[in-house]
Amino acid sequence: MLLSDDGVRRLREALTRTGYTAKGIADRLGPVATAGVGRNDFRAALRATEERDPLATLIRLFVCAQTEPERDVADALSPLPLADAIEAGLVERHGDGFRQGVDLEPYGDDWWIVSDVPARPGRPLPADHVLGVGGASTTLAAATVRRRVGSALDLGTGCGIQALHLNEHAEHVTATDLSERALRFAATTAALNGQSWELLRGDLIEPVRGRRFDLVVSNPPFVVGPGVATHTYRDSGRPGDAVCAELAQAAPGLLTEGGTMQFLANWVHVAGEEWEDRVAGWLAGTGLDGWVIQREVADPMAYVDLWLADASDGADPHRKAAWLDWFDEHRIEAVGFGLISLRHTGAADPVVRVEDLRQQVEGTLGERVREWFGRQDWLRAHDREGLLAARYALADGVQLLQEATMGEEGWLVDRQVLRMTHGLRWSEEVDPLVLALVSGADGRVPLREQLSVLAIAHDAPEDDLVDAALPLIGHLVERGLVVPAA
């Protein structure tokens, strides 16, 4: 840890005493200044903290990155002695005062995260930089399926954000990282929040090889590149997207029966290849159910600019040129970003879906993933006869949109689209058979009876209609467009 046990206790007392929490800061700053802080605009926050007290000092120091007078800093951190805070690297002397040495960020309702200070202009991040709260970490936290489990693993914990969340619903939390510095920050984060995790050092799954967990999450160093590791937090040392393929292949050996693994990933879009086939290949032979959803796609130039700027390394034209040349050499046209969710069911017929999900999702993505796996369970439990005997109802909020062209005999429908206004908000074009199935899904009539009526109405062989309809009803259930009626 950065501090002794007693030092952590004293720091927690200082933060609690001053009200240095997310709510306390928001109440002190007000909505306008709080919104400005979210945009890295600290002008209103600095005006709101001109009248000094311990909370104002901590906000100016750790939120607004200001240099504050020694007496004010010592006052705000009391009962933690300033000398102890300096020795731990929490603050550092700067000019005639003190500035933050670490990022001490309130998180959630009553947590604190300890990490390295974000990049400063003109000062590239060191190789062992430990990230704090960011877009990727909050995305994974929101996408994780939250259920009570016995054991949980956070692979590549960094400062410990995912482990904090896991501790809320897991009896035992293990967290690993290649970086000794990251583990020190994670240990401090855990202790500061009154939690206890098993912390292990090593590369990816090496520290836990041979062990199994009920839930595994990872925000790995997934950045796609030539395999040169300049920053531990983003670079795995594997070329391309190999680290994500490696994690997918390792999943069966990490999960208990019924266990789930979820991790963020990048994958390359190679000219002449389908990215879906590439990622599906990672899951081949694992025996796991898998749902891969692509949330974003970046072209090589934007991708390289993003990650060079992230490490304040964007001023190096040679680094940028070499990175882009590598993309060209490997015919990489784009890089996808998304979530891979895997589950160990022991089924002989694992389901793997790889698809785009760019639209905004209602609620947390974790809820939607849990529901998706639940629908797979229902479908797996119902064979051909079970599907035909079931009753189905149209999901709440499903709309039918039609595009039509005016002809000599009136409007002619060119295209019909079903759109979900809730949940995953899928939108897809449908043919007349799908529309007939959806229109007849009132929750009262078994599918077999519904198909019998359709066969008579369209003068079609009922068996042929059944063969055509069953895959469609499975798809509609999987998407959540129709739901099995109780």
Image (spheres, helix red, strand yellow):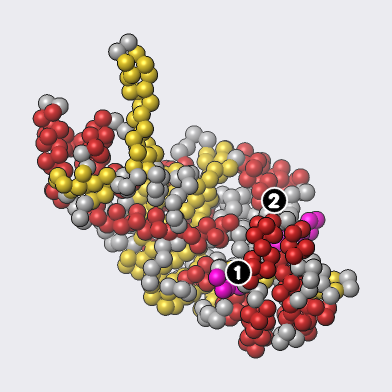
Determine whether 38 is above or below 385 in the image: below
- Mark number, residue 238: none
The amino acid type found where label 1 is placed reads Lys
To which residue does mark 2 refer? 308
Q: Residue at x 52, y 67 (%)?
A: 162
Residue 112 among magenta residues: yes
Q: Residue at x 14, y 44 (%)?
A: 445
Which image quarter: residue 425?
Answer: top left
* Residue 398 against residue 104 in the figure, above or below: above
- The one nearer the camera, 39 or 478, is 39
Q: Position of residue 428 (x, y in %)?
A: 37, 36
* For residue 66, above or below residue 467: below
Residues 259 and 14: in front is 14
Image height of 282 relative to 356, above or below: below
Q: Which residue is mark 1?
A: 23
Q: Residue 186 location, x and y as percent?
A: 59, 74
Quarter-wise, where is residue 277 in the image? top left
Q: Residues within 10 Å of mark 1 (few under 14, many from 20)?
A: some
Magenta residues, start to end:
109-123
Q: CA distance from mark 2 to mark 1?
A: 34 Å
